[in-house]
Image (cartoon, rainbow, N blue to C red):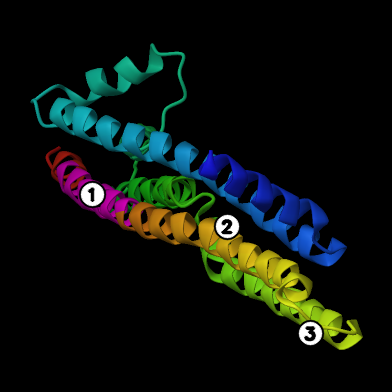
Amino acid sequence: MPETKQSLSILHLILEASFLVQMVMLILFLASVISWVMIFQREIYQRKASAAFSFFEKQFWSGIDLNQLYRQGNGRNEVVEGIENIFRAGFKEFTRLRQQAGADSDAVMEGSMRAMRVALAREEEKLEENLPFLASVASVSPYVGLFGTVWGIMVSFLNIANAGQPSLATVAPGIAEALIATAMGLFAAIPAVLAYNKFSARAENLLSNYRTFAEEFSAILHRQVHSK
């Protein structure tokens, strides 16, 4: 029963808050909801990318013929992403340039490496998608909540000045709604900053693996183009 009373009192304070404080609470609530949607989306995408990297890397180093590995991707209807996209971009350009009459070995390698760099840049954008928004929520939300707090306290002081006989009942609602705004600001910011740090570190780790693979794959292509 006490918990129910506390919940109702908090809801009452939110409903009875000034329009400006309610707008602050609404903005923070929406920011929190959007952040959680992005957090779940990033978690699913980055986990999938990490699993795809491990799977494709095992295939690549299993000794399978590169042409066969490339053709396997042609037979799938799903969108190719991650490390396989980097492989396919580099190998496709390598094959296309090598088939040209009188193709220079250095030009072939430069073309394939350029294609992999472009693919790598696109994968970097995908891995870091929505992270700037999480960073903004993490840094701005406490200040938005603080603004609501300052406004609520200012309203409380105005109520004290206008009341003939100031009492706790006169100032308590304004201070309480101010504290709720602060709490909502922290509620939006804390998950966002934790998620941003986690996903940034994971994205950087995956990008490092992608770059290492691209360098190793370039070395293999370099040996092939100079073998004949």
> In this orientation, which residue lies closer to the viewer: 158 or 207?
158
Q: CA distance from mark 1 to mark 3?
A: 58 Å
| Residue carrying label 3 | 157
Asked which secondary structure carries label 1, the reply is: helix
For the residue marked with disc 3, what is the amino acid? Phe
Q: Disc 2 marks which amino acid? A: Phe
Q: Observer-nearest residue: 70 or 45?
A: 45
Residue drawn at x 17%, y 30% as measured from the top left: 60
Q: Which segment did they paint magenta?
A: 202-220
Neighbours of disc 3 within 10 Å: few (<14), some (14-19), many (20+): some
Secondary element under disc 2, as helix, strand or loop, is helix
CB atoms at circles 1 and 3 under 8 Å apart? no
Q: Look at the image and say whether residue 22 sits in the magenta stretch.
A: no
Q: Which residue is mark 1?
A: 209
Q: Amino acid at mark 1?
A: Asn
- Total marks placed: 3
Above or below — where is 142 with respect to 26? Answer: below
Q: Nearer the viewer, mark 3 or mark 2?
A: 3
Q: Is residue 92 above or below residue 151?
A: above
- Tell me: 56 left or right of 16: left
Return the disc, 1 or 3, that comes first in the chain's sequence. 3
- N-terminal label among 3 and 2: 2
Q: Nearer the viewer, residue 23 or 45?
A: 23
Which residue corresponds to mark 2? 133
Q: Residue at x 47, y 47 (%)?
A: 122
| Quadrant of the drawing holding the C terminus | top left
Please state the horizontal and vertical placement of residue 212, each as a whole percent of the image.
21, 52
Q: Does residue 135 appear to the left or right of 208 in the view shown?
A: right
